[in-house]
Image (spheres, rainbow, N blue to C red):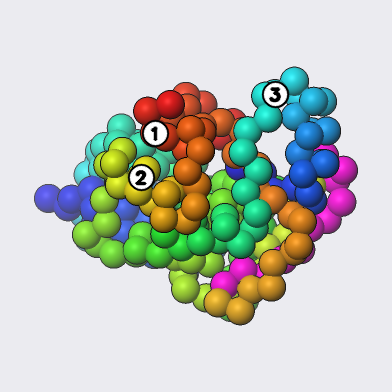
């Protein structure tokens, strides 16, 4: 997951790398995803999310396209 | 017998405190167990896709959100510096530590520096984006690329 200056840089980078365009997430939304994903990582009881929990986490921060479906 | 959860947490605490990955022998001393137990826990955590190990040595390569090796994502807070595996993990360090951090990287397209702060008082760069090249279902096909 790379940080790029803006959408135009994403388009150009994908073209130059020969990669399909993925999803470009604005920083504020990526931050909310990071908080949901990592804020409890220092708890001894932490465990990996189930696919359902993962999908719920994505949905909670507004990542709802088919790209984010764990089964996709 | 030490459990993988305690080893996982010991690794993260070591990264937080020292800025880098513990060797298995080093973590064994810290946690009061054998290096063999640590290596066994490392393998279990890697099998569960929680850590990534160096091929061959079995030492830590990735303990998300931290990288054991330098990456394009340098994260700084409280006089300490870490390497994050990716942009999302750089934000993840701030989230995990619940503290403001400074992140330094370069746009992979234009190579211009990108500096930002992340944490409770973040003011986000207006147009910058985190690009997820692969959907979540494919992240572990090649975690180094992801």
Q: B36 or B138, which is in the foreground?
A: B138
Q: Is residue B27 left or right of residue B69?
A: left
Spot occupied by residue B119 in the image (x, y as percentages of width and height): 57, 72
Pick the quarter of the image with the C terminus of chain B. top right
Q: Which residue is mark 1?
A: A70
- What is the magenta range? B109-119
Q: CA distance from mark 2 to mark 1?
A: 7 Å
Instruction: Mark 2: give few (<14), some (14-19) or many (20+) Cα within 10 Å.
Output: some
Specify which label sits upstream in the sequence, 2 or 1.
2
Q: Which residue is mark 2?
A: A54
Q: Chain of mark 1?
A: A
Q: Chain of mark 2?
A: A
Q: Is residue B123 left or right of residue A12?
A: left
Q: Element under label 2?
A: helix
Q: Which residue is mark 3?
A: A19
Q: Is residue B129 above or below residue A12?
A: below
Q: CA distance from mark 3 to mark 1?
A: 20 Å
Residue B21 visible somewhere in the drawing: no
Instruction: Mark 1: give few (<14), some (14-19) or many (20+) Cα within 10 Å.
Output: some
């Amino acid at each position: 997951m790379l940080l790029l200056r803006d959408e135009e840089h994403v388009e150009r980078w994908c073209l130059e790398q020969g990669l399909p365009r993925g999803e470009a997430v604005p920083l504020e939304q990526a931050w909310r995803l990071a908080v949901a994903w990592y804020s409890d990582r220092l708890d001894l009881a932490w465990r990996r999310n189930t696919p359902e929990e993962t999908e719920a986490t994505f949905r909670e921060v507004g990542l709802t396209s088919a790209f984010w479906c764990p089964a996709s | 017998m030490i459990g993988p959860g305690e080893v996982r947490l010991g690794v993260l605490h070591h990264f937080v405190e020292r800025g880098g990955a513990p060797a298995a022998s080093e973590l064994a001393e810290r946690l009061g167990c054998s290096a063999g137990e640590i290596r066994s826990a490392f393998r279990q955590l890697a099998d569960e896709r929680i850590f990534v190990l160096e091929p061959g040595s079995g030492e830590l390569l990735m303990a998300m959100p931290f990288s054991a090796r330098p990456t394009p994502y340098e994260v700084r807070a409280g006089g300490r510096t870490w390497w994050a595996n990716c942009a999302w993990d750089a934000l993840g360090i701030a989230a995990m530590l619940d503290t403001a951090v400074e992140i330094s990287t370069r746009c992979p397209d234009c190579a211009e520096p990108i500096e930002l702060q992340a944490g409770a008082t973040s003011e986000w760069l207006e147009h910058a984006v985190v690009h997820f090249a692969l959907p979540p279902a494919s992240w572990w096909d090649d975690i180094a690329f992801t």
